[in-house]
Image: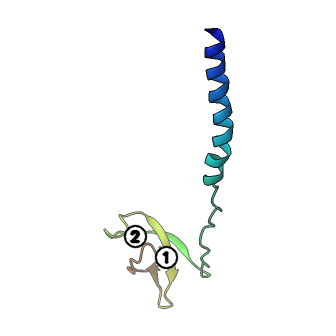
Amino acid sequence: MIAIVLGGLLGFGFIGLLILPRYLGTRRIHAATTAPFHTIRDGSRWLPCHTTVCGHITTRHEPTGDGGWLCTGGGCGHITKGDQ
C-alpha cells in the first residue's frame, strides 16, 4: 500500500517537473515601458486651475507672453490672467 502511494507521489512529481519548464516558458516577463518625456518651457508655474476639466487642482501653466498663463493639464487650454 505504501509503495502505491509513494509511486503515485513520485510519478506526480516527475510529471510536474516535465510540465513546469513549458509552463514557465510561456510566461515571459515583458520589457518595462518608460514614461514619456515632456520638455517644460522656461517660466512654467504650477497654479490652481479652476475649471471642471482640471477638477480645480494645481496643474502646470506656461506663460503666454501677454501676462497670462496657459493651463497644460489634460488639454484644458484655460488661460489665467495676471501674476499669480
Residue 11 coordinates in the image, percent (x, y): 65, 27
In depth, the one of 75 and 56 nearer the eye is 75
Dot placed on the residue nearer the N-terminal end, 2 or 1: 2
Q: Is 1 displayed left or right of 73 in the figure? A: right
Q: Is residue 40 above or below residue 27?
A: below
Q: Is residue 30 above or below residue 44?
A: above
Residue 76 coordinates in the image, percent (x, y): 38, 77
In depth, the one of 78 and 5 nearer the eye is 5
Residue underneath mark 2: 49
Q: Is 47 displayed left or right of 35 in the figure? A: left
**Quarter of the N terminus within the rendering:** top right
- Quick one: SS at disc 1? strand
Q: Residues within 10 Å of mark 1 (few under 14, many from 20)?
A: many
Q: From this viewpoint, which residue is outermost toward the left?
A: 52
Marks 2/1 in contact by CB < 8 Å: the verdict is: yes
**Amino acid identity at mark 2:** Cys
In depth, the one of 39 and 59 nearer the eye is 39
Q: Is 46 displayed left or right of 40 in the figure? A: left
**Amino acid identity at mark 1:** His
Splitting the image into 4 quarters, where does residue 18 fall?
top right
Splitting the image into 4 quarters, where does residue 33 fall?
bottom right
Residue 37 coordinates in the image, percent (x, y): 62, 74
Q: Is 59 displayed left or right of 41 in the figure? A: left
Q: Residues within 10 Å of mark 2 (few under 14, many from 20)?
A: many
Residue 67 coordinates in the image, percent (x, y): 47, 86
Q: Residue at x 34, y 70 (%)?
A: 53
- Quick one: SS at disc 2? loop
Residue underneath mark 1: 61
Q: Is residue 17 above or below residue 9?
A: below
Q: From this viewpoint, which residue is outermost toward the top?
A: 1
Q: Residue at x 49, y 87 (%)?
A: 64
Instruction: State the CA–CA distance, disc 2 to disc 1.
Output: 9 Å
